[in-house]
């Protein structure tokens, strides 16, 4: 399941989605809107996406993960629209036969999502707003040695 | 070289959309024109895009593409800033 959605994200539903008789471990990552960024107090954020391409890139990442780690059950969802501090913006859940594959796949997935999926964050402060724009890089070429 | 044209759909996102005051348009380009040439032409049509002072990311039909990519009829082209989801 690879989706861009407007509604609040529900981790438990996705855990159910990736569970199954052959799944021995489920790992997850939930990204949450934080109150402070680079010394500024954040009151809200807006996520915008290019939904058709974003879902396609998410599916591509999922296929790559299965090539690296073997059969997995993967759910990746990103919320768009205006979010308040404390709300979840992204959820990644992976079910695998064993814990190592599940944990590593989740870690790879969030790093690639942050560098490749066409989604943009605008932060709102008490006195204005700002688009977050990381230094330009070419997705797929610089993602392996960058931190998140 | 017969002066034929291709019509492409252009999408702008995030800060580029705000700078241009426009999110989607159709543009006619000459046969053989590249994605990079389209970006240059777009900046002429929307000078406010020059405030974005490095090359944007580019995609054709929902896949990342390089400025050398030659455009085809009915391509869906997108220009956008570095991504910041997560």
Image (cartoon, coloured by chain):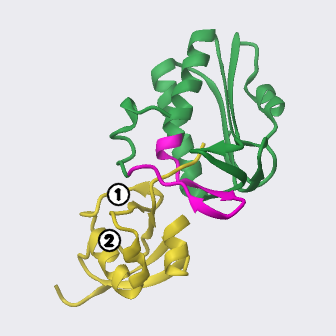
**Circle 1 Cα neighbour tier, 10 Å, few/some/many (<14 / 14–19 / ≥20):** some
Quadrant position of residue A31: top right
How far apart marks 1 and 2 lie (CA) works out to 11 Å
Confirm whether residue B13 shows in the render: no
Question: What is the x, y in percent for residue A25?
Answer: 69, 13
Identify the residue shown where x is 54% and y is 19%: A104
| Furthest-bottom residue in this view | B3
The disc, 1 or 2, on the residue closer to the chain's N-terminal end is 1
Image: magenta residue range: A114-135
Query: Which quadrant is home to the N terminus of chain B?
Result: bottom left
Q: Nearer the viewer, residue B24 or A1?
A: B24
Magenta stretch: includes residue A87: no
Residue that badge 1 annotates: B65
Q: Which label belongs to residue A7?
A: none
Residue B30 drawn at (x, y percent) = 27, 84
Q: In the rendered view, would you say A44 is above or below B53?
A: above
SS state under label 1? loop
What chain letter is assigned to the residue under label 2?
A: B
Q: Is residue A141 depicted above or below B53 in this figure?
A: above
- The quadrant holding residue B33 is bottom left
Q: Which chain is yellow?
A: B
> Which residue is depicted at the point 40% across and 36% down?
A143
Between A91 and A124, which is closer to the camera in this rendering?
A124
Residue A13 location, x and y as percent? Answer: 83, 33
Asked if residue B58 lies left or right of residue A125, the reply is left
Say which of A22 and B8 sits in front.
B8
């Amino acid at each position: 399941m690879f989706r861009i959605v407007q509604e609040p994200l529900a981790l438990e539903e996705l855990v159910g989605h990736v569970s199954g008789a052959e799944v021995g471990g489920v790992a997850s990552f939930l990204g949450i809107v934080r109150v402070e960024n680079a010394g500024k107090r954040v009151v809200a954020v807006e996520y915008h996406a290019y939904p058709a391409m974003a879902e396609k890139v998410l599916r591509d990442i999922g296929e790559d993960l299965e090539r690296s780690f073997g059969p997995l059950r993967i759910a990746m969802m990103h919320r768009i629209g205006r979010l308040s501090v404390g709300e979840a913006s992204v959820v990644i859940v992976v079910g695998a036969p064993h814990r190592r594959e599940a944990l590593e796949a989740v870690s790879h997935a969030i790093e690639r999502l942050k560098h490749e999926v066409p989604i943009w964050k605008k932060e709102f402060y008490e006195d204005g707003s700002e688009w977050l724009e990381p230094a330009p890089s070419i997705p797929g070429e610089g993602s392996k040695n960058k931190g998140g | 070289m017969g002066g034929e044209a291709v019509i492409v759909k252009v999408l702008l996102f995030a800060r580029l959309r705000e700078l241009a005051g426009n999110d989607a348009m159709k543009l006619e380009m000459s046969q053989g024109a590249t994605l990079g040439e389209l970006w240059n032409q777009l900046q002429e049509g929307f000078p406010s895009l020059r405030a974005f002072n490095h090359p944007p990311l580019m995609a054709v039909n929902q896949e990342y593409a390089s400025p050398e990519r030659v455009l085809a009829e009915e391509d869906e082209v997108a220009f956008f800033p570095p991504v910041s989801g997560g």
